[in-house]
Amino acid sequence: MNKYVAFLGLITVAGFAAVGATEAPIASPTPDPFIPAKLEKESFGATMRRDFHKIRTTWDDYFKVWDKPRENHECTTLDKIRGTPIFFMHRKVEFNIYLNKRGSFFRAILAPFHRDTHANFSCWNYSADLWDREQRTDVFPFLYVDLKDDKIIRKIDGCPQFTPLHVWGNVTMVSEGFPWITLTDAEQLKEPTHSLASLRDLELAWTTMDKKNWTMAERELKAVIEKDIPVQTRIKVYEALGYTQMHLRKYPSARESLVKGQRLYGSPRVQFVDYLALRDTTAVNSLVLLTKTDLVLGNYEEAVEAGDLALYLQPNNAVARAEYGLALAKAGDAKKGLWEIDQAQRMSSGERLAEANRNRAMVFLDQGNVDGARTELENAIIIKVSDPQLHIELGDVYALSKDWAKAQSSYESAAKLAPEMPEPVFKLAGVFKSMADAAAAENKADDAKKYQDLAIKNCEECEKIDDTFGPAYLLHAELLKAQGKAGDADKILRKGLKNSRGSSMIQKAIEDQAPKSAEAVPGKADRVIVDGVEYSIDEAKAKFPTLKIESPKTEAPAADAKPAAEAPKADAPKAEEPKKEDPKAGEKPAEGNKQTAAPDNHKPVIDVETEAKPQPAAR
């Protein structure tokens, strides 16, 4: 060790000696103009290194959608400050708001703010639903700016009402449970501002959703998205649109809407979390809806990713954990999925979580444990008796066990809880059809007819509730065909095809039950017979678009034969009569007789027995 240290010391001393021996050159203050400039060409590697250096140094700016927190300032939300004002006492904070207007809220004795020294402003939290009248009345009036900061006051005064602002300030004091905040700076967010017209449209859309008129709500929400609204509101509109489309059974469209809302947060996970902390959003609810939608569509891997991200943002969310467990089970890991569902139930209040019981029942059904699924769904209904979907799923389990009475009771309960839903009424029709089939198998014709009529009645009721619900038309047509009403069944299918805007299932049913070909009517070139009914060719093509119409086969007349209209009616034999043997074979046939016309080289008439024998091949 000592010899290495001595060796390094010698090198160091030698280096210092060399430096001392060499005289440093004197730098010229200006370059010599007579020396030619050296031209250097940058290598390809150096060019690549420069580009990578630029990406590395500007990476944050690429994903940045807001300015980084200022020094000694804490990013938070107005709701958090109002919730625990003592915690933020004498702390510097920055948060987002919707500006209301300049006010005159002063308490000279309670707070160190006076109209002669400060300007007062009021606002709403950035996450507030301004289209909701109750939330619009919840105004926060405790924002103050020192009159010496004339620049900030003029900046805020120049913003219209409902402008989204990012403000910096200090929680000066807490009085009567309210934080009194002194603003030190404000910047307008780079996004659109609410208008009274957009707020009215949003209020109409949410009112329609409350009335469960999902078709109109979808139309109103799509109209709102086309307008200029703040980012936070646009995220909520996409979430509401996805929720509405789920009720309309438009699951691919619902997933697309929810994904568009998630994209507004930013893709990387770290930026996603920071963005949530700043913007105070409700992304977890949207992610839970996205998980449910992917489960319905069978996108189990995507459902696992959405549930995992929801738990990353909010680990204590029991509903998100229950949906994540079901996604894991559907993706193939049933053991871990059931463990996550059990954890979700333990995290809930009193260990009572209907979603956990329901999702556990779905896993049991996949495993073939029908009794366990029935028990879990019954427990879920005890916790959440007003959920119609739970009653429908319990009815499905009873139907698997062919317990038609209990299935009927479950579907009827769901129909009472959600009269706007067509599913329980349709499933009730399916129960009556199954009961009719069972009665027909036991040769009970009267009971079978009674249950068929009840099933048809429920199909008609389902079509009144939602005239775009395609399965109701298919079941209705099947029941009518079972009663021998094929024509009425065809009318129902065509009505369903029109109302459902070209449902592929109904189109296939029409094609399957339509006749494949038509028979030509002898002697009538423009008439065909389809299913025993005679139509003209145009009528048949209009009624049966997929029908293959065969043209009638007619024999070509002989060259020397005259039209049949010129022949005497008395001499013309009937077409149905068999051909008689002519005693005068050499004579020319009667004029106009198309049946007996033949070429000049007549062949002798062959006996039937002789004709049946095989003839020798001609050489």
Image: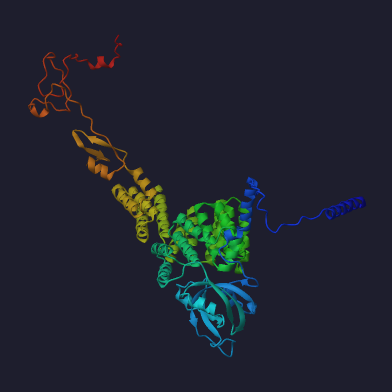
Q: Is 132 displayed left or right of 494 in the figure?
A: right
Q: Quadrant of the C terminus?
A: top left
Q: Residue at 11% across / 16% down in the picture?
A: 588
- Point out residue 415 in the picture as x, y percentages from the top left corner: 42, 63
- The colouring scheme, among rainbow, by chain, secondary structure or one colour, is rainbow
Q: Is 96 displayed left or right of 487 in the figure?
A: right
Q: Looking at the image, is 156 positioned above or below residue 63?
A: below
Q: Looking at the image, is 192 positioned above or below residue 21?
A: below
Residue that extends furthest to the top in the rendered view of this protein = 619
Residue 473 visible? The answer is yes
Q: Residue at 49% across / 81% down in the picture?
A: 102
Give the image quarter of residue 89.
bottom right
Judge by depth and name the residue closer to the eye, 586 or 79.
79
Residue that extends furthest to the right in the rendered view of this protein = 2
- Point out residue 238 in the picture as x, y percentages from the top left corner: 47, 62
Residue that extends furthest to the bottom in the rendered view of this protein = 109
Q: Is 601 displayed left or right of 431 in the figure?
A: left
Residue that extends furthest to the front in the rendered view of this protein = 34
* Tally of numbered discs: 0
Q: Is 164 displayed left or right of 28 in the figure?
A: left
Q: Residue at 59% across / 59% down in the picture?
A: 309
Residue 311 visible? The answer is no
- Point out residue 299 in the picture as x, y percentages from the top left corner: 53, 52
Judge by depth and name the residue closer to the eye, 111 or 496.
111
Judge by depth and name the residue closer to the eye, 203 or 453.
203
